Image (cartoon, rainbow, N blue to C red):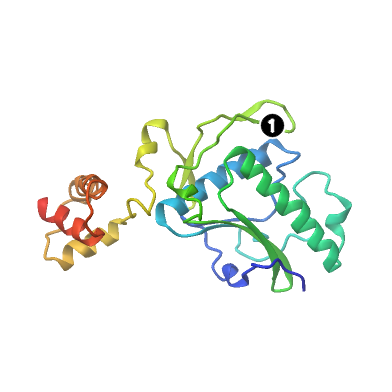
Amino acid sequence: MIQSNEFHSPIFDNITEGHLRDRKQELHKVLSHDKGLKDFLVDVVALANSARLRGQDSYLLYGVDNDRRIIGIEGQDIKDPPRDLAAKTTDTDIERHQGEFVGHRLLDVIKRHIGGFHARYEFGYVNDHLVSYLVFPGRTPENWHINLYQIVCDVIGPESKNILLRAGDCWTRRGESNDRVEERDKSGLYCHEIIPFITTRQWLLYARNHGQETSTGLDEVLIPLYGEYNRALSQSEQRVDEVMLQCINNQ
């Protein structure tokens, strides 16, 4: 069965939505539907920022329903009505449709409205179903990930011709949801390579391992601790663990 060069089927072993994973039953109709284009760009920005924050790749999976069953994307397209090629089943036709049309166009939409940050579109078979996914890198060769991902120009709807999104619109993942990031909060979306992301659980474990009392309310301990950590790390040549311990001891 045909697949793209870097398709990795084990990615579909974990189809639970979270900070680094979202799943869709159908391809986004980015070329013909306002909602399809808007939802696609919001998903991409949110997942890309989550990957940037955590220093890990994130994924948008296609061909998985809400019950987490792999149902495939056979016959689907990114426009309505679909092209005739979408319904054809030979390896050559699938490769042309998924590679030259679907993948190429989705990546073009990303580049035009967000930027060219080495997202990839891959397709192949899992459980005899054709599936695909977009991968957003936690780190990029040209250091695109140093900068926050956001909409770079107003987005015009293919149906209504109205403005769907505006330049500067930004989102990130919070669990299974995409959360809008307001302008005042953008400075808090760090890049893992510059300021590594430390989860609440990691802070608690680190504090306990160094004999620190953590029975105080989480907000009272972690909010000032995390702020001090970010300030110290941005001004320091020390290793991350040294800065963590220093900040904990200062509380």
What residue is at 63 percent from the left and 71 percent from the top? 9
Observer-nearest of 120 and 62: 120
The picture places residue 126, in percent across and down from the top left corner, at 68, 71
Q: Residue 152 sits in which quadrant?
A: top right
Describe residue 186's horizontal placement relative to residue 41 as left or right: left
Q: Residue furthest top?
A: 162
The picture places residue 138, in percent across and down from the top left corner, at 47, 56
Observer-nearest of 178 and 186: 186
Describe residue 71's horizontal placement relative to residue 146 as left or right: right
Task: State whether residue 156 appears in this view.
Answer: yes
Count the numbered circles shown. Answer: 1
What residue is at 46 percent from the left and 49 percent from the top? 145
The picture places residue 32, in percent across and down from the top left corner, at 76, 39
The picture places residue 243, in percent across and down from the top left corner, at 20, 56
Q: Circle 1 — which element? A: loop
What residue is at 59 percent from the left and 53 percent from the top? 119
Give the residue at mark 1. 157
Neighbor class of circle 1 (other Cα within 10 Å; few <14, some 14-19, many 20+) is: many
Residue 70 lies, with reference to residue 24, above or below; the image says below
Quarter that holds the N terminus? bottom right
Residue 182 lies, with reference to residue 110, above or below; the image says above
Describe residue 65's horizontal placement relative to residue 213 as left or right: right
Q: Residue 114 sits in which quadrant?
A: top right
* Residue type, mark 1 in image: Gly
Describe residue 236's horizontal placement relative to residue 158 as left or right: left
What residue is at 75 percent from the left and 31 percent from the top? 159
